[in-house]
Amino acid sequence: MRNFDYMTPTRLIFGEGVIAKLPEVMKPFGKKILMTYGGGSIKRIGLYDKVKELLSDFEIYELADIQPNPKYDPSVLDGVRMCKENDIDVILSVGGGSVLDCSKAIATGAKYDGDPWDLISYKAFATDSVPIVDIITLAATGSEYDCGGVISRTETNDKIGYMDPHNFPVVSFLDPVYTFTVPKNQTAAGCADAMNHIMEQYFCEDSTILNDGFMEAGLKSLMINTVKCIENPEDYTARAEMMLTCTYGCNGIFSLGNSPTGWPCHGIEHALSAYYDITHGVGLAIITPRWMKHILNEKTLPRFVKYGVNVFGIDASLPEMEIAEKAIDATYKFFESIDIPMHLKEVGIDESRIVEMANHIAVNEHLDRAYAPLSEADLVEILTASL
Amino acid sequence: MRNFDYMTPTRLIFGEGVIAKLPEVMKPFGKKILMTYGGGSIKRIGLYDKVKELLSDFEIYELADIQPNPKYDPSVLDGVRMCKENDIDVILSVGGGSVLDCSKAIATGAKYDGDPWDLISYKAFATDSVPIVDIITLAATGSEYDCGGVISRTETNDKIGYMDPHNFPVVSFLDPVYTFTVPKNQTAAGCADAMNHIMEQYFCEDSTILNDGFMEAGLKSLMINTVKCIENPEDYTARAEMMLTCTYGCNGIFSLGNSPTGWPCHGIEHALSAYYDITHGVGLAIITPRWMKHILNEKTLPRFVKYGVNVFGIDASLPEMEIAEKAIDATYKFFESIDIPMHLKEVGIDESRIVEMANHIAVNEHLDRAYAPLSEADLVEILTASL
């Protein structure tokens, strides 16, 4: 086991109707709230009105229209400006992981004198932030329980994941009922995102009995519950189990003490959605089995055998390479079974920029240091196999 | 899934040599430290000297001789008095769960004007506390990652578990090397304590795929690693895995959203060690399989089947009742295999006070509301079967 330094101070308030606690949670921070959200979904499900009603005693400023793959310009910059101009006490993020990621960049940016991109690109480090409370409406990214975010900058094709301990939400409200209206394709994409968060940690040099069992249970939970959510979008228990499982995805608790892995699929996918603005979870689902096939070798084989036997119940008495191949195939087929488009061409990506993207990834993501190191040539092969 | 409100803000600094960070961790709190510890073990392993050397710039007050099953009088009362008299800035708990539990009661007691027992017995609630940092030297209680403690009051045979969110340690240092010298019997007792923490949560009305897998992995981790630690006390990986698994025991993360269970074995054991001052983990190991046998019925059967198949690998095609009985037997045999005395008589407890203890438990522990409700008569039967 490796040494680690771990903390997740966020309070999780979970379950149907917990939003009733919102006023008492917000009160200690002050009167001035920046409420951040995306498109119209929170209005359609009545959450926008509910929040405004519950917080009628507060002074609410609104930053709307935060996009998936949230953008530095205008969303982060607008939010930072609004915080500074209005002396905002607390940010209330209402929506999915993109809204929350954007809110995190705003929170530290608002307490920084220079260009907020300095913080996202680690040119400078935050010393303070505006506190964040969130109401999460999509089971996927786990942003509600970590201190990271991913921000895109269109003009440079940058999509950067960054972490800052100031960015842990103080409180996350998780009501599974708000995910009842998430359409099938987004439910599936959220599942793929969360499954990949676990796989990025599972495929590593060394792990523990505890972490492996925790992660294998997480993967099974996501697959079984996603199928139920797609069959019956109002299955409370399935939505709830999915929501909680997603929550653990990115704060490191699945892999405390494990060897680092480099999160290669995320590194590759960030280029795809930076260049083409595709849905993150779909990009991950397409890349994952191709990446698995590419890195399967004698060294990585034992992890794939464990994955196949414990997650998919593949017969442990089969030859090891056969178990591994069946496991990769089962991964592909699961994503296909929940109707995720499994080829880049289906989401509008052709071969024209593969070499350019592979170079961008190689320069920015340091995947030569991944569990199974990937060179620029490896990246071209994985991307080409994903077409 | 049930609604829940969960937070564990403690920072875990884990691994060999992490104590080097102690001065920078302590600095923000102030100069005046109350260092709490137990018997001589931290002196024997050189930890006492190391701490004093690292903190030579601080003003250190010492509360020594904190006993297992830590006592309200004198330890808690002395600690509270020392904090108040010396205006202590931070408590540094160096030792196992008993030292830390005692330190927690001191931390809130020191900021309370009345009798600290009011807080332990929930007659009053803390509004403030002295911050706690700990260096844990025994893998067992999980006190380093929760806000609870158990305090004994000899004159009334009370052993009370209580929780207060002020009592989360701010930082817990976990260096597995400090557990190399833990003798076999204490290693085994720590394992039984931590296993029981999981079982208390596992046997419940409803759980999730994620929680079940997490808990089953926790139980397997504890059994496999304890055997390794006993065979080779300096097996770093086994000590480390055991230490981390124990850490999750009592903060609720194993069972978020599960139905409540009442923690019946702890309720029973608290009476045993309050009346006879036996080792907590040993008491739990003795009680657990007798409790299991007692509550096995048609309603609880499915959980025992799951436990037997997933934790002990019992053949799932056997009749369900046979799987359950084999699982209970395997639990008993595991504790026996690590040389835990498995009869109350072996630890000096005879039948003379069973009726009195059963009454004390029935009055104080509310086990009529447990997952499998226990009446006073049930308690007499379980205790008698444990003789």
Image (cartoon, coloured by chain):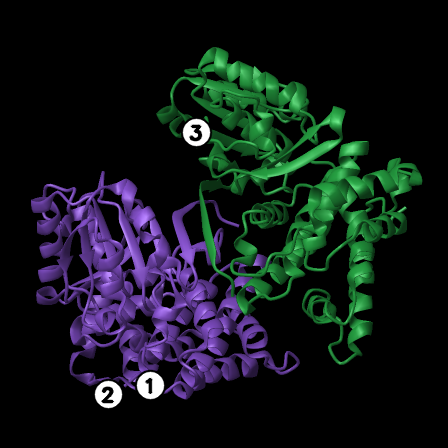
Chain colours: A purple, B green
Inspect the image, locate mark 2, and give the three-letter code of the amino acid beneath it.
Answer: Lys
Q: Which mark is residue B128?
A: 3
Answer few, some or many: residues within 10 Å of disc 1's Cα (few below 14, many 20 plus, some between 14 and 19): many
Choose mark 3 or mark 1, whichever is in front: 3
Label 3 sits on a secondary structure element that is loop
Could you tell me how far apart the alpha carbons at marks 3 and 1 are, in whole angstroms? 55 Å
Label 2 sits on a secondary structure element that is helix
- The chain under label 3 reads B
Inspect the image, locate mark 3, and give the three-letter code of the amino acid beneath it.
Answer: Asp
Which quarter of the figure has residue A279? Answer: bottom left
- The chain under label 2 reads A
Indicate the position of residue B232 as horizontal and vertical percent values.
Answer: 71, 45
Which quarter of the figure has residue A161? Answer: bottom left
Residue wearing tag 2: A345
Label 1 sits on a secondary structure element that is loop
> Residue drawn 79% across and 79% down?
B318
Q: Can residue B281 be seen here?
A: no
> Residue drawn 74% across and 26% down?
B154
Q: Can residue B74 be seen here?
A: yes
Q: Which mark is residue A342?
A: 1
> Residue drawn 49% across and 24% down?
B91
> Residue drawn 74% across and 47% down?
B231
- Asked if the residue at tag 3 contacts the one at tag 2, i.e. Cβ–Cβ closer than 8 Å, the answer is no
Indicate the position of residue A235 as horizontal and vertical percent values.
Answer: 45, 77
Choose mark 2 or mark 3, whichever is in front: 3
Nearest the viewer among A131 and B133 is A131
